[in-house]
Amino acid sequence: MVWRLDSGLEDKVVIVTGACGGIGRAVARDFAEAGSQVLATDLDQGALDELVASLPGGGHRGLALDVVDDVAREQLVDVATQQMGGIYALAHTAALLIRRPSLNEVTEADWDSQIDTNLKATFFLSRLVANAMTERGEGRIILFTSQSWWTGGFGGSSVYAASKGGVVSLSRSLARNYGPAGITVNTVSPGQINTAMLLTDLDPAVYEKMRAETPLGYVGEPDEVSGVVVFLASSHARYVSGATINVSGGYLMY
């Protein structure tokens, strides 16, 4: 196969959740560069409108919703299938991180909101999307975990780490169940990436320690993650499923 960025992606409909975040924005842009039609979703319609207007190519749409809401998830899938022609790929970057100074300060509300957003919504959205993909006989689902699924949480993010560990296990189960329908399911595991989420309530000393311990010597940028997502959605990765791709500049090695 001749290497092309758009291999299998041109004119395909791709849902990108969390599209106004640092990584989500880069993912949406790279899919648009590859010729895909991007259905971008996040919480703020104004920010989505600005994002969609900035994307190259045509046919892109922005739809504000909360992925925790089951009715909103169904609306998202309906727009992709009924109005845009069907879902080829889901890049699910949306997540919630709440850091607390100590485990004793973690509340049940902290726990519930992060598990609901990061794990529960991931399952139900993935199932909806996979059922739509099954009718087409192919599809790519790319979920997002974090280096904390392996290391545990830094900076009081223990619940976030637990939720992201669940995403890794979930993605493997989804890959086993939906593989016979021609659907691959993989997970991207970013390390320290320069986004607002990384910096949320993070002790600067922890940030500097992570940077210093990264063999490549710097904190990554969102576009150093988005290319991996596009690869996993492309035909070049058609035989990759159930994998967790480590994108941490060597901070983790497994």
Image (spheres, rainbow, N blue to C red):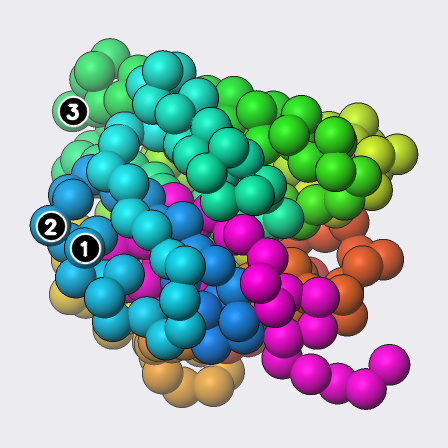
Alpha carbon of mark 1 to alpha carbon of mark 2: how far?
5 Å
Residue 84, given in percent of the width and then of the height, sits at: 49, 44
Side of 153 relative to 37 (left or right)? left
Disc 1 packing (10 Å; few <14; some 14–19; many ≥20):
some
Tag 3: residue type?
Glu
Residue at image point 25% right, 71% down? 54
Residue at mark 2: 46
Comes first in the chain, label 1 or label 3: 1
Alpha carbon of mark 3 to alpha carbon of mark 2: how far?
34 Å
Residue interval drawn in magenta: 1-27
Residue 205, given in percent of the width and then of the height, sits at: 19, 66
Disc 3 secondary structure class: helix
Place residue 235 in its image quadrant.
bottom right
Q: Tell me, yes or no, whether the highlighted magenta stretch contains residue 18.
A: yes
Picture quarter with the C terminus: bottom right
Residue 164, given in percent of the width and then of the height, sits at: 48, 38
Residue at mark 1: 49
Q: Tell me, yes or no, whether the highlighted magenta stretch contains residue 99.
A: no
Q: Is residue 139 above or below residue 114?
A: below
Residue at mark 3: 105
Residue 142, given in percent of the width and then of the height, sits at: 58, 49
Residue at image point 37% right, 57% down? 60
| Residue nearest the observer in this picture, 92 or 144 | 92
- Would you say residue 111 is visible in this rendering? no
Comes first in the chain, label 3 or label 2: 2
Residue at image point 56% right, 43% down? 85
Tag 1: residue type?
Asp
Is label 1 or label 3 in front? 1
Disc 2 packing (10 Å; few <14; some 14–19; many ≥20):
few
